[in-house]
Amino acid sequence: MIQLSNPLSTLDTSFADTARRFKDNIIKFDSRSEYACCALLEKYCSFFETTPGVNFQIQLGSRRVDFKIKDTFVEFHPTKLLFEFKNQDAWNLWKENIRRVEKHPRENLQEAIRKELATRYFRSRRLLLDATGHDKSNLIVVQDENEFIKKVLARFADKPLPRDRELTREFRQARGEAS
């Protein structure tokens, strides 16, 4: 169990149910990674207490943004090709042909596509913020725990951080993975 700032609530790292009691409310997490982000933010940022609609899962128009830390919006968005393709025929064509490419060029092509999709996602989130009156706010989009540690925790933590390796272990443990 991970103890969060509210002594009345604990997080169950088994994630059988991706919700936790927080006072009289239930906080639902869209992913285990989202949960891990909240756990580490609460542990290392004394000012952060997970509050839906305020600093977690903030509704902007018909969309939500994962986190707001001070004046910065943060999205945890791994680029997974399977989920990024919107056209099934395009996905099938990609999948069928990428297998025929040798390993090194294949990895380079996959990385190029991931970078392009990550850039498009960032731009779409930036447009959302701009369109909803948050044009002066900063935006950070991270794709994995390493980026979260380097771009978010390192920037906002007001408590001493352990080494990146330990933070990665904590993140994975909170996400429910064996260390």
Image (cartoon, rainbow, N blue to C red):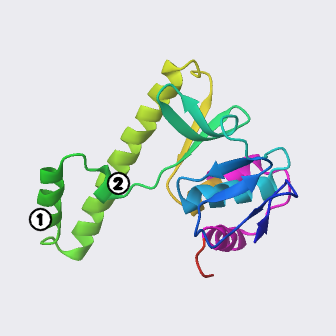
Q: State whether residue 79 appears in this view.
A: yes
The amino acid at mark 2 is Arg
Question: Where the N terminus falls, by quadrant?
Answer: bottom right
- The kind of secondary structure element at disc 2 is helix
Could you classify mark 2 by the number of other residues whose Cα lies within 10 Å: few (under 14), some (14-19), or many (20 or more)? Answer: some
The amino acid at mark 1 is Asn
Q: Earlier in the sequence, mark 2 or mark 1?
A: 1
Q: Position of residue 41 (x, y in %)?
A: 73, 53
Q: Name the residue under label 1.
A: 97
Residue lying at 24% horizontally and 75% vertically, measured from the top left = 103
Q: Do the residues labelled 2 and 1 touch (CB within 8 Å)?
A: no
Q: Name the residue under label 2.
A: 114
Residue 162 among those drawn in magenta: yes
The residues tagged by marks 2 and 1 sit, at their Cα atoms, a distance apart of 17 Å
Residue lying at 36% horizontally and 58% vertically, measured from the top left = 80
Q: State whether residue 162 appears in this view.
A: no
- The kind of secondary structure element at disc 1 is helix
Q: In this view, does 125 lie to the left or right of 88?
A: right
Residue lying at 66% horizontally and 70% vertically, measured from the top left = 13
**Front-most of residues 160 and 29:** 29
Q: What stretch is highlighted in magenta?
A: 151-175
In the displayed structure, would residue 99 be above or below residue 54? below
Q: Is residue 119 left or right of residue 50?
A: left
Q: Quadrant for residue 160, please give it.
A: bottom right
Q: Where is residue 67 in the image (x, y as percent from the top left)?
A: 63, 42
